[in-house]
Image (tube, rainbow, N blue to C red):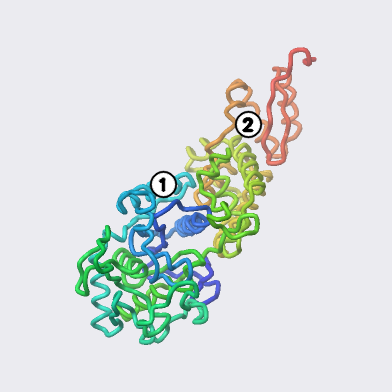
Amino acid sequence: MLKIYNSLTRKVEEIKPINPPNIGMYTCGPTVYDFAHIGNFRTYVLSDLLLRTLEYNNLNVKSVMNITDVGHLTGDNFGDADMGEDRMEKAASKERKSAWDIAKFYEKAFLTDFESLNLIKPSVMPKATDHIKEQIELIGILEKKGYTYQTTDGVYFDTSKFKDYGALSTLDEIKEGARVEVNPEKKNPRDFALWKFSPENEKRQMEWDSPWGKGFPGWHIECSAMSMKYLGESFDIHVGGMDLRSTHHPNEIAQSEAATGKPFVNYWVHGAFVLVDNKRMSKSLGNNYRVEDITKNGFNPLALRYLYLQTHYRQEMNFTWEALEASHKALERLREAVGRLDQSEATSSPSLRLGVSGREFEQKFQDAINNDLNMSQALSVVNELLRSDNPASFKAQSLIKFDKVLGLNLWEAPIKELEAEIPEEIQKMVKEREELRAQKRFHLSDQLRNKIRKLGYETKDIEDGGTEVSKIPSSSLK
């Protein structure tokens, strides 16, 4: 029974799909005006882990992640997403490129990092600029129902007319930014833009005709328009960073439910922030690290994924290079241990059945991931399984399943040097001896160990049930 913390109800709840076994999930994606950093990617890894866990529970997931390539204004940094400059236009001016080229470049960079962290690509990745028509239509519905009003700079949603506005957050948190110029024409500080007019006597690179005048959509409307297009007016899960909980997501709920008269999303899942050396990430501090910085410093990007797994998604995570190095080494040790197992035997034997002990480990793993995505506990189960007396083939069978959730590519790095230096005959004997040890037939395993030694190879048993093998120098043979 999969349970998740629902930010809307502030409780850990069992996920009950609207249309089982199908389930719809929407994740707020990147604004492609700059590179995504490791704080952003913690949210995307959260979404990926939830997707994998849903599938592990035999649910058919349709996942959608948007690409914001227009309408996200710089005022959002200070608490008012309707003020400031368009991030795309600002980046285009700074880099002396077109806004369209900016979007294309940073989207490609995002997808490269996305792939390096072994994230499953969503079923649909819609772009805001490809769905202007749907956004205009949604605003039109809100206008007909009396939820909008017009100012000199745009069309706004009147939050006073939506009874349950702010249920996801608290009304105290939904306030106008103190560091940007307020809009005196707004009826309520919490009202938000649905459509922004292009400035007079200024040609924007991204602007469209609308019933209200030439301009561009507000940031919030795209997520409602695209999520409902691909997942329906009501769907199951919405994922995003904690920074979206106070304004962006309450605004999505308000405009969506005002338009349809139906509940918008059943479960809201938010990931906590990433700190760097116990400080907030910022360009001024030079600590808003990217996935590329991970690889440039000689680390496997999946070591970052492993690091994410060690802290629960609802807790702030502190990134340090020392912690990443420890995760990198832990991942390599895990891969070395897994690489000694016979994956081919597990995958080529559909009739293979786990014993009682093996089933217990699989149940422990599922209990951990189903308990609000307790991935650190799931990793503990992996290590416990490797140290157990279960046969290597059973361990491999379970670990193949576990890695479908963890996404660490555990089989990617077998000990190639060992395989290259140790003859196939010796490798087979080593595996046979491991099976004997797992069966507690120690007398026979010792006999086989002596036989291996006589052939010139030393064996050393390790904690996870595997074996290190090395060639004995000829001068040391007796």
Q: Is residue 231 left or right of residue 243?
A: left
Between 322 and 361, the residue placed more toward the observer is 322
Q: Are marks 1 and 2 in contact (CB under 8 Å)?
A: no
Residue type, mark 1 in image: Ala
Label of residue 109 in the image: 1
Label of residue 443 in the image: none
Q: What element carries label 2?
A: helix
Residue 128 vs 440, above or below: the answer is: below
Residue 272 vs 167, above or below: the answer is: above
Between 196 and 431, the residue placed more toward the observer is 196
Q: Where is residue 162 in the image (x, y as percent from the top left)?
A: 37, 84
In this view, the residue farthest toward the top is 475
Q: In this view, does 75 lie to the left or right of 456?
A: left
In this view, the residue farthest toward the front is 201
Residue 183 vs 21, above or below: the answer is: below
Residue 160 vs 82, above or below: the answer is: below
Residue bearing mark 2: 431
Which residue: 28% across, 68% down?
Answer: 199
Of the two numbered discs 1 and 2 on the same chain, state the one appearing first in sequence.
1
Q: Where is residue 449 in the image (x, y as percent from the top left)?
A: 73, 26
Q: What element carries label 1?
A: helix
Label 1 – label 2 distance at C-alpha: 43 Å
Which residue: 45% across, 51% down?
Answer: 35
Within-10-Å neighbours for mark 2: few <14, some 14–19, many 20+: some
Q: Position of residue 336 (x, y in %)?
A: 62, 36
Is residue 367 visible in the rendered image? The answer is no
Residue type, mark 2 in image: Lys
Between 241 and 55, the residue placed more toward the observer is 241
Mark 1 or 2, which is nearer the eye?
1
Is residue 429 visible in the rendered image? The answer is yes
**For the C terminus, which image quadrant?**
top right
Which residue: 55% across, 35% down?
Answer: 413
